[in-house]
Image (spheres, helix red, strand yellow):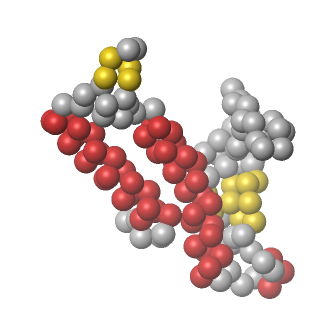
Amino acid sequence: MTTDIKHETDHTATAHTPGTWEDNGNGLIYGQVCGDDGEAPFVADVCRDGASGIYSAEERANARLIATSPALLAFAATIARMTRDGEDVEGREFVMENDEAVGTLNALIDEARALVAEAKGLAA
């Protein structure tokens, strides 16, 4: 299933390679193996000079961030689906109950912290 997204140039964007994405340790990012072809789709190359064989700290950080992108997008989409306190829902003002709000926000904070740690290479 693809989702069409209109950009300012009015071109229709193609859906991205499905996550989870992984850094192969050499600056190349690959998606999940899909179907029977057995090959993970290529996503990105973060090395400025692949011929040198040197994978800098900055390139490793870029690779981690790129590889974390599908999870970050999914997290943002989860938050975007939430109803804000005071938002109109079917003609009525939504009022979040305190216990529900605290539980929801704590779970979002925990997930956000885990995703940030993973993107920064600090995940356990």
Q: Is residue 87 left or right of residue 68?
A: left
**76, above or below 61, in the image:** above
Percent across and percent down for residue 34 are: 69, 38
Residue drawn 73% across the image and 31% down it = 4
Percent across and percent down for residue 91 are: 38, 14
Any part of residue 120 in sight? yes
Q: Nearer the viewer, residue 113 or 54?
A: 113
Any part of residue 14 in sight? no
Residue drawn 60% across the image and 58% down it = 67
Percent across and percent down for residue 8 are: 78, 44
Percent across and percent down for residue 73 are: 55, 46
**27, above or below 97, in the image:** below
Q: Nearer the viewer, residue 111 or 54?
A: 111
Q: Is residue 87 left or right of residue 103?
A: right
Q: Nearer the viewer, residue 81 or 69?
A: 81
Q: Is residue 63 left or right of residue 2?
A: left
Quarter of the image where the N terminus is located: top right
Residue drawn 83% across the image and 38% down it = 10
Q: Residue furthest left?
A: 99
Q: Is residue 105 left or right of residue 79?
A: left
